[in-house]
Image (cartoon, rainbow, N blue to C red):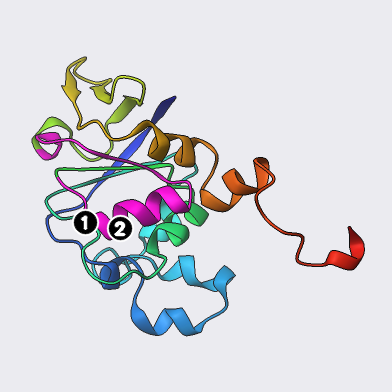
């Protein structure tokens, strides 16, 4: 799987409350994404485009298990690459079909706005501006399969592992 996109750069310890503020969780699902990063990047939601990539520092996504990855996906973010990614957030990325990769050195490797190419078969990131390639941290193939399927529910649905919620229509 190869992903290409424009980068948006964030710092260290970006928590889920910055990504998706707590009070927003009370809003209908389709309204939640427009509040992403409102505290630290006002107006960012109006600039991000389908296929864009977030680059973060250390411990990206720390905090609660709220569905911040889902909101980022709804905004068009296809991939998150960070120096390190909080384990719960990484799993939520996989569950919602957002590609995620830990890649030590990524913060100094790119500048915001750089176009990058991420090759998940090799777990590498290529900066298209400089031509340089950086090695990311490999993770289990099964996790990559979940991401490629678009998330855990689409994967389970494709494998016919979900029961019909309306059995009378079956």
Judging from the image, what secondary structure is the residue with disc 2 in? Answer: helix
Q: Which mark is residue 89?
A: 2
Q: Quadrant of residue 138?
A: top left
Horizontal relation, residue 159 to residue 150: left or right? right
The number of callouts visible is 2
Relative vertical location of residue 90 with respect to residue 65 in this rendering, above or below: above
Q: Which residues are magenta?
A: 84-107
Please name the residue shown 65% across and 41% down the image.
159
Residue that mark 1 sits on: 86
Is residue 32 one of those drawn in magenta?
Answer: no
Q: Quadrant of residue 15?
A: bottom left
Judging from the image, what secondary structure is the residue with disc 1 in? Answer: loop
Q: Which mark is residue 39?
A: none
Quarter of the picture containing the C terminus is bottom right
In percent of width and height, residue 60 lies at 20, 55
Horizontal relation, residue 170 to residue 1: left or right? right
In percent of width and height, residue 2 lies at 42, 24
Quarter of the picture containing the N terminus is top left
Please name the residue shown 42% across and 59% down the image.
45
Horizontal relation, residue 117 to residue 164: left or right? left
Asked whether the residues under the numbered discs 2 and 1 touch, taking CB atoms below 8 Å apart as contact, a structural biologist would say: yes
Q: From this viewpoint, which residue is outermost toward the top? A: 131
Relative vertical location of residue 132 with respect to residue 108 in this rendering, above or below: above
In percent of width and height, residue 140 lies at 32, 34
């Amino acid at each position: 799987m190869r992903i290409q996109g424009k980068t948006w750069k964030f710092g260290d310890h970006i928590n889920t409350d910055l990504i998706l503020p707590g009070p927003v969780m009370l809003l209908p699902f389709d309204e939640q994404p427009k509040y992403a990063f409102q505290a630290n990047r006002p107006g960012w939601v109006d600039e991000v485009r389908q296929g864009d990539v977030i680059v973060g520092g250390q411990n990206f996504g720390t905090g609660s298990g709220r569905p911040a990855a889902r909101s980022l996906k709804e905004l068009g973010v296809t991939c998150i690459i960070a120096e390190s990614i909080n384990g719960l957030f990484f799993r939520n990325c996989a569950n919602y079909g957002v590609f995620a990769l830990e890649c030590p050195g990524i913060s100094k490797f790119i500048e915001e706005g750089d176009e990058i190419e991420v090759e998940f078969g090799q777990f590498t990131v290529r900066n298209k501006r400089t031509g340089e390639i950086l090695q990311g941290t490999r993770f289990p193939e099964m996790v990559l399969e979940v991401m490629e399927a678009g998330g855990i529910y689409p994967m389970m649905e494709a494998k016919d592992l979900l029961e019909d919620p309306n059995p009378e229509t079956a």
